[in-house]
Image (cartoon, rainbow, N blue to C red):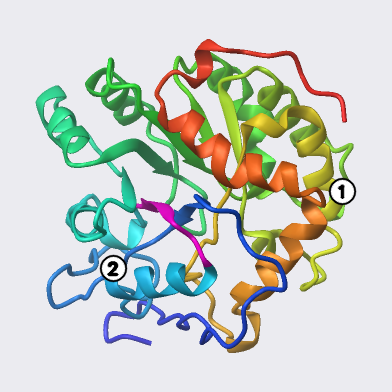
Amino acid sequence: MTSRGVPDCFEPRPLASKPSWRLPKGAWDTHFHALGPQSRFPYSPSRKYSPPDAPVEKCLRFHDFLGVERGLVVHANTHGYDNSVDLDAVSRSNGRYLGVVRLDMKASRQYCRELNNKGCRGVRFAFNPQHGGSLERPIFDHVMRCIEGLGWFVELHFDGAEIPALRQWLEEIQANVVIDHFGRIDVALGVNQEPFQILLSLLARGNFWVKLSGADRISRLGYPYSDVVPFARALTGTRIDRLLWGSDWPHTSYFEASRVPDDSKLLEAFTAFVPLDEDRHQILVENPAHLLSGSASEKVRPAISR
């Protein structure tokens, strides 16, 4: 526990073994965080926990080990509204990374265009209560005006139980929308639960994307996350062309060492979520490229029956 009463969380597990399968050439990790070093990029005083430093050098070593070629460094609420750490990671990645930032009422159209020129392609609103508090609609509406015309996507992290209440607002968003971590669905309620069925209907619309990430966060059983498999299969059966994969490294907000996931095992579990090589290639390589083209929502296809 820090002197401010902000709890410390554990660092990621050491990379001891590689998964039994090889990621395809050009694979993307669409969800990881660069954190610190705090001597250069201080954490926000309003943060809810203090993770160990995970600077860009560690990000690159992590991706080299797993065979990930490209990545989206996603802003963590740990750094408040200061995107410096993300911009640093993008600039020092030798073209491997693009950025997803966090913005507030101080944002302007000019600032967002500067961010775009520096390699940012999306803006995140993390209002899952455990991590980021509540959705502030005036901020969201202001930011949407600021990013108009850039082709950015909007990334959302929320509590899955809130999906029914959010549905109308979600359907009104005029942009590509990326939803983190399986929508943080409560897997104990089964695939027929209302929040997950709404998530499937959103996915079928064409401008919604879901990250097959954070299985460790929603599973009640732990590795190999067999309780998450039915949800992954339902998502792939709805719009496999609208799914992404993310490692969620360095797995912040874990306060018990035994709960920190093994990254190689997370990738092993991905083979159960997506059994076919061609489908994994689509999720890991083709879909990120399509999303980042800025025109993904222009080619809406019918829901895929699998």
Residue 249 position (above or below residue 282): below
Q: Which residues are magenta?
A: 67-74
- Between 34 and 43, the residue placed more toward the observer is 34
Query: For the stretch drawn in magenta, what is the main secondary structure?
Result: strand
Q: Are marks 1 and 2 in contact (CB under 8 Å)?
A: no
Label 2: few (<14), some or many (≥20) within 10 Å? many
Total marks in image: 2
**Quadrant location, the C terminus:** top right
Q: Residue beneath label 2, please?
A: 56
On the image, the x and y values in percent for residue 87 come to 20, 52
SS category of the residue bearing label 1: helix
Whichever of labels 1 and 2 marks the residue nearer the N terminus, that label is 2
Is residue 186 visible in the rendered structure shown here? yes
Residue 213 falls left or right of residue 143: right
Residue 146 position (above or below residue 3): above
Label 1: few (<14), some or many (≥20) within 10 Å? some
On the image, the x and y values in percent for residue 6 come to 36, 77
User: Which numbered tag is attached to residue 230?
Assistant: 1
Residue 113 falls left or right of residue 219: left
- Identified by mark 1, the residue type is Pro
Is residue 228 visible in the rendered structure shown here? no
Q: Which residue: 39% across, 75% down?
A: 61
SS category of the residue bearing label 2: helix
On the image, the x and y values in percent for residue 149 come to 28, 15
Per the model, the C-alpha gap separating discs 1 and 2 is: 34 Å
Q: Which residue: 18% across, 31% down?
A: 112
**Quadrant location, the N terminus:** bottom left
**Is residue 115 magenta-colored?**
no
- Between 176 and 143, the residue placed more toward the observer is 176
